[in-house]
Image: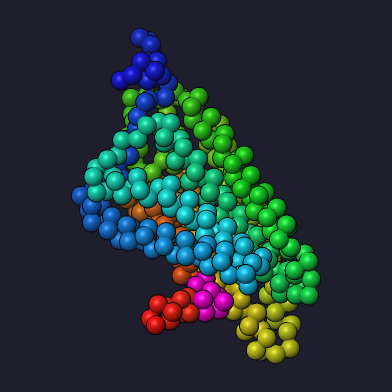
Amino acid sequence: MEAGDKKHFMSSPNSTTVSYPPTLLLVGIPGLEKEQFWLAFPFGMMYAIAVLGNITLLVFIKTEPSLHEPMYLFLAMLAFTDLVLSTAALPKMLSIFWLGSGEIGFLSCLVQLFFIHAFSSVESGVLMAMALDRYVAICYPLRHSSILSVPVVVTLGSLVLARGVVLVSPFCFLLRRLPFCQRHIISHSYCEHMAVVKLACGETTVNAIYGLFVAFAVAGFDVIVIFVSYTTILQVVMRLPSTEARLKAFSTCASHVCVILAFYTPALFTFLTHRFGQNIPHSLHIMVANLYLLLPPVLNPIVYGVRTKPIRDRVVLLFRQKAT
């Protein structure tokens, strides 16, 4: 152990607590240590699909001028966020499953934690912005381009990113100030705020309260905006004169609703299980937490690629060119 590490890891004779340890140990999926080697194969395939799909989306949107509209700019933000979110966790997770390489430096753990929580917040914010885009497109179709101009879209994206960075950064500082006991094993596949907090033997009330505040400030606000947006959209659509017009309006929202459910359902399960799910098997909790980081990045490009005609047409054209 280096001298710099020792000074962070010394304990006093009359105390069982220490400052932050130099390394922590991620166990993967508790209770499924033998099976996780094989579980890594579908996880690895899903990660490969997520990376390929989201990079493809970004390339299509960047190179196709007709896709430089608010909806597709938000979709590009979502694709970039999914790439960061999945890459922050999956390479390390796969090394745990396949190589048993669960050791991670404490500061590296904080970096992973920061990126996972910050970009989870960003993803939630982008989904909220996309709901606003659908609201403006359906309720104010003639003013859509003027209300959601490119500068406005960029500003919204910047605010969402800044919100994630500002709200999540205190997690790292709050964790560094905690005394840690001799327990350095994280019963998780990646560094998650509450999973690391549980290793501390000092007072963690501030961490728990701030974690709840961030969850409600981010997800609570975004879900309310999404709910109000779609409630208004539903009222407007039901007043449309023709069935064909109503179906077309619903079709433009269907992709976004699927993506919202894929993101918030495992997120809500993970959040509630951490605090109230003592009777839920820990292995199930960790599996859902892993899918929370992997399922949206996999599904988003597939859902939008299939449901969005300009992107679908571009993919078909690309394959036809390769075939000839």
- Which image quarter: residue 309? bottom right
- Tell me where residue 282 appears, x and y as whole percent: 34, 48
As drawn, 57 above or below 184: below
Q: Is residue 98 magenta?
A: no
Q: Residue drawn at (37%, 26%), measured in percent from left and top? A: 22
The residue under the point 27% across, 48% down is: 97
Residue found at the very far left of the displayed protein: 34
Give residue 205's position: percent from left, percent from top.
Answer: 53, 31
- Residue 235 vertical placement versus 44 (above, below): below
- Which residues fall within the magenta stretch? 304-314
Q: Position of residue 120 (x, y in %)?
A: 52, 50
Query: In the image as oriented, which residue stretches furthest toward the front?
Result: 324
Give the quarter of the figure containing the N terminus. Answer: top left
Frontmost residue, 305 versus 181:
305
Q: Quadrant of the C terminus?
A: bottom left
Instruction: Provide the major secondary structure of the magenta segment.
Output: helix
On the image, the x and y values in percent for residue 137 come to 71, 72
Q: Is residue 283 left or right of residue 65?
A: left
Q: In the image, what residue occupies the spot 61% across and 48% down?
A: 161
With respect to residue 79, does 176 lie above or below?
Answer: above
- Asked whether residue 98 is in view, the answer is yes
Colouring mode (rainbow / by chain / secondary structure / one colour): rainbow
Which sits in the foreground, 53 or 98?
Answer: 53
305 falls in the magenta region: yes
The answer to which of 58 and 179 lies nearer the viewer is 58
Residue located 63% across and 45% down the image: 163
Residue 280 seen in the figure: no
Q: How many marks?
A: 0
Q: Quadrant of residue 25?
A: top left
User: Which residue is at the far top?
Assistant: 13
